Image: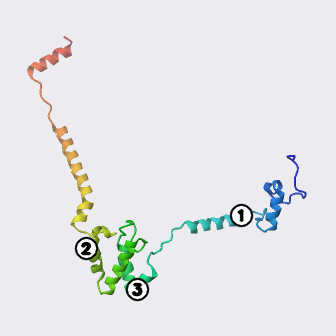
Amino acid sequence: MSVGKNPSPTPPQKGEGLWRRVLPSTARRVASAGLLPPCGGDGRQAREGLRATFLMLVLLLTPIHAFAVNPDEVLADPVLEHRARTISAELRCMVCQNQSIDDSNAELARDLRVVVRERLVNGDTDEQVLDYVVSRYGEFVLLKPRLSLKTLALWGAPAALVLVGLIVAFVSARRRAVQPSAKLSAEEEARLGKLLDGE
C-alpha cells in the first residue's frame, strides 16, 4: 500500500477522518449500523456531546445521601418516624464509627435503630432515648458529645497546655534578660588591662 493513495474504492467525503481512510471496511460496517458519529460541521455537535458527557460524569460521581433504614423498621406514625430519624442521626455506628446509625448498614446499627423506635413507641422522650443508649454504649456513641466536665477537659487541655508553655517561655526569657552581669574583682581588672595593653 502506498502512502499517498486512498485504499478505499470511493474517495473520502468531506468530514471523513483518517481512520475511515485507513480502515474502510470497518468504517462502512460502523456507518451502516448507525454507530458512526456525524463528522464535519461547525463543532456544535461535539460541544453538545462533551457537555452531555461532562453532565453524566458529574451525576455519576456525585455522592448521593442514602439512608440505610429498612422498610420494616419504619414506624407507621410519621411524627414518631421523624423523631426516630432525628435521634438516629445523632448516634454513631459503633462498627463504622464515622457514620450515624441512620446511614450505616451494619447489624449493630440496625439493632440500635430498632431500639430507638421501640423506646419511642413505648413513650420515651428524645432525651430519655439518648440517655438509654448512652448508658449502654457510653458517650462515644454520640456524634455530638454533650457538654460536661469531661468534654471541657478534653477540649480545653490542648489550649491550657499551650498557655502553660507560653507562660514558661515568657518567664524563662525574662529571667535570662534580667540576670545581672558579675563585676570583675580588682585583680581581674588588672589582668584584663595588661592583656588589652599587649603586655
The kind of residue on which mark 1 rests is: Ala
| Residue at the outermost bottom position | 77
Residue that carries the numbered disc 2 in the rendered image: 135
Question: Residue beneath label 1, please?
Answer: 46
Asked where in the image residue 113 lies, by quadrant, the reply is bottom left
Q: Amino acid at mark 3?
A: Leu
Question: For the residues marked 1 and 2, what is the alpha-carbon distance in whole angstroms?
Answer: 62 Å
Task: Looking at this view, name the residue that lies furthest to the front.
Answer: 107
Between label 1 and label 2, give the one nearer the viewer: 2
Whether 29 is drawn above or below 3: the answer is below
* Residue under the point 39% across and 79% down: 85
**Which image quadrant for residue 40?**
bottom right
Upstream in sequence: badge 2 or badge 3 = 3
Could you say whether the residue bearing mark 1 is in a helix, strand or loop? helix
The way the protein has been coloured in the rendering is rainbow
User: Dot 3: what SS?
Assistant: loop
Which callout, 1 or 3, points at the residue further toward the start of the chain? 1
Q: Tell me the number on the disc at residue 75.
A: 3
Please tell me which residue lies in front, 148 or 25: 25
Q: Is residue 198 above or below residue 105?
A: above
Q: Position of residue 106 (x, y in %)?
A: 41, 71
The Cα–Cα distance between marks 2 and 3, rounded to whole angstroms, is 24 Å
Q: Secondary structure at mark 2?
A: helix
Q: Amino acid at mark 2?
A: Ser
Instruction: Please state the horizontal and vertical placement of residue 82, each as a whole percent of the image.
Output: 39, 83
Whether 120 is drawn above or below 90: the answer is: below
Is residue 9 toward the left or the right of residue 61 in the image? right
In percent of width and height, residue 77 lies at: 40, 89
Q: Nearer the viewer, residue 104 or 195?
A: 104
Q: Nearer the viewer, residue 174 or 163?
A: 163
